[in-house]
Image (cartoon, rainbow, N blue to C red):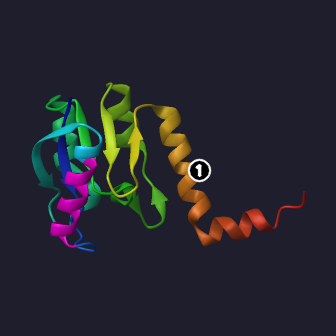
Amino acid sequence: MTTALALLESSFKIPQHLQLLSIRNYAISNNINISFYGNERVGYENRHDLFIEYIEKSREEAYLFFTIEQFIFNDIFYTELLIEATNKGLLLFFANENLKITNRMDIINTKILLLSKTSRAYRKISKINY
């Protein structure tokens, strides 16, 4: 069984009781034991201070986030921390998307998936002549 720190999304777009329910259901379905629930400081979510501290101190083998959108700011998918975590062999889970990231290729595939879901990307793709 994998043990993970669960990190909730702090902006309160989705009520935390619903995030907790989603995370718990994901953990049960994927045989994950949650060691602790936490969240980044409100207003500083994009800094990922708690996540960085845990990565640097190798406190967990895996991290379970509510959503991959915790790494998207101003329509930019910030992958640096995800790359750093996977380079250290850490497992990253995202309950809302039913997503698991274990390596750089998973990050690239996730980035492509996120890009394909934006209307701006669809408009660019639809203009290409085949």
Magenta stretch contains residue 22? yes
Residue 46: x, y in percent?
Answer: 29, 58
Instruction: Judge left or right: residue 12 versus residue 101.
Output: left
Labels in figure, total:
1
The image shows residue 21, relative to residue 13, as above or below, that is above
- Please name the residue shown 39% across and 41% down the image: 100
The correct choice, above or below, for 70 with respect to 64 in the image is below
Quadrant of the rendered image containing residue 60: top left
Q: Which residue is mark 1?
A: 112
In the picture provided, is 76 more to the left or to the right than 21?
right
Residue sitting at 53 percent across and 57 percent down?
114
Q: Position of residue 38 (x, y in %)?
A: 12, 53
Query: Which residue is drawn at the image coordinates 39% and 50% (left, top)?
Result: 98
User: 4 and 54: which one is in front?
Assistant: 4
Q: Which residue is farthest left?
A: 36
Q: Quadrant of the N terminus?
A: top left
Badge 1 local density, few (<14 within 10 Å), some, or many (20+)?
few
Q: Amino acid at mark 1?
A: Ile
x then y, percent, for residue 91: 32, 33
* Magenta span dominant secondary structure: helix
Q: Is residue 52 above or below residue 38?
A: above
Residue range (magenta): 15-26
